Image (cartoon, rainbow, N blue to C red):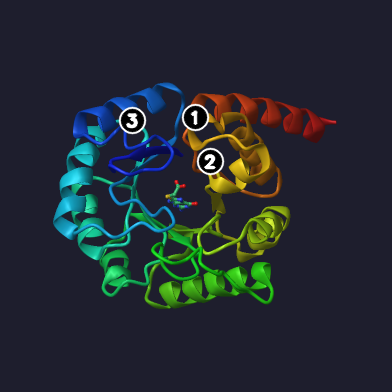
Amino acid sequence: MGVVNVTPDSFSDGGFFFSTENAIKQARKLIEEGADILDVGGESTRPGSLPVSVDEELRRVIPVIEALAGEKTLISVDTSKPEVMRQAIIAGVDIINDVNALRNSGALAVLAENDRVLACLMHMQGCPASMQNNPTYHNIVQEVYDFLEERIQLITTLGVARDRLIIDPGFGFGKTLQHNFEILNNLEYFTRLQTPLMVGISRKSMLGAVTGNPANRRIHESVAAALIAVNNGARIVRVHDVKATKDALSFYCAVQKNNDIK
Ligand code: 7PJ
């Protein structure tokens, strides 16, 4: 999954793609690089960021989604707002990627009303404005697991088929470096939920904490993180650097296949 930001304050690219035209250009580049899914987002969720209005978010994402709707690539919208979800579905998205796991009022109804789109449910402790202040857990892996299991249970009870759901432990969303390490090392545990596992680590601060590189120079450590994630059970990786990640994963898959045959 390639990230297409339509935000002025996105941490990883300095808001460079904040215009419809630039976002579409970036999306087409990621398609050429081999993205299977494009994740279009109009609201920054970086730590400390503040929400944008529904109208502003619609103004950012809808024209980009409409322009990409004819492509073979699946389109995802990174939003927590029911109205944005609804309009994005009309504009042609295939996946709702909600960092708030459909907890906003009215979000569950959007998915239940529709019988086509998939939803990615992500774990977050707190909200972006304050989530990194003092994230606390007794058992991070079990707590994130229990949260996702509860969300799956509730949503399927409403009549949404389980095979329309994707789960994501939410790296960096109300988590310290140690919490992120624990989740990455125990990713396999989440596959018990029998729902495709997605992760987003690309260019995040947990990488910079180790290498000291600024966000836009974290390609190598991002690729390493994607490989570890896939090796530990992830099926979708949300990344900024599609070509580099694809190449690494192609090699990984070739080795795995060879191992299967023998
Ligand atoms: C994630 C996301 C993630 C999912 C962002 C960033 C911050 N959606 N949206 N998982 N991160 N599902 O790109 O660093 O980890 S925005």
Name which of mark 3 and mark 1 comes first in the sequence: 3
Identify whether 119 is placed above or below 106.
above
Residue type at tag 3 = Ala
Q: Say whether marks 1 and 2 touch (CB < 8 Å).
A: no
For image coordinates 20% across by 62% down, the residue present is 83
Residue denoted by label 1: 242
Of the numbered discs in the image, which one, if any, rests on residue 27?
A: 3
Label 3: state its secondary structure: helix
Q: Say whether marks 3 and 2 touch (CB < 8 Å).
A: no
Expressed as whole percent of the image width and height from the top left, the position of residue 170 reads: 52, 58
Residue at mark 3 to residue at mark 1: CA–CA distance: 11 Å
Callout 1: CB less than 8 Å from ligand 1: no
For image coordinates 42% across by 53% down, the residue present is 46
Density class for disc 2 (Cα within 10 Å; few <14, some 14-19, many ≥20) is many
Residue 191, quarter of picture: bottom right
Residue 24, quarter of picture: top left
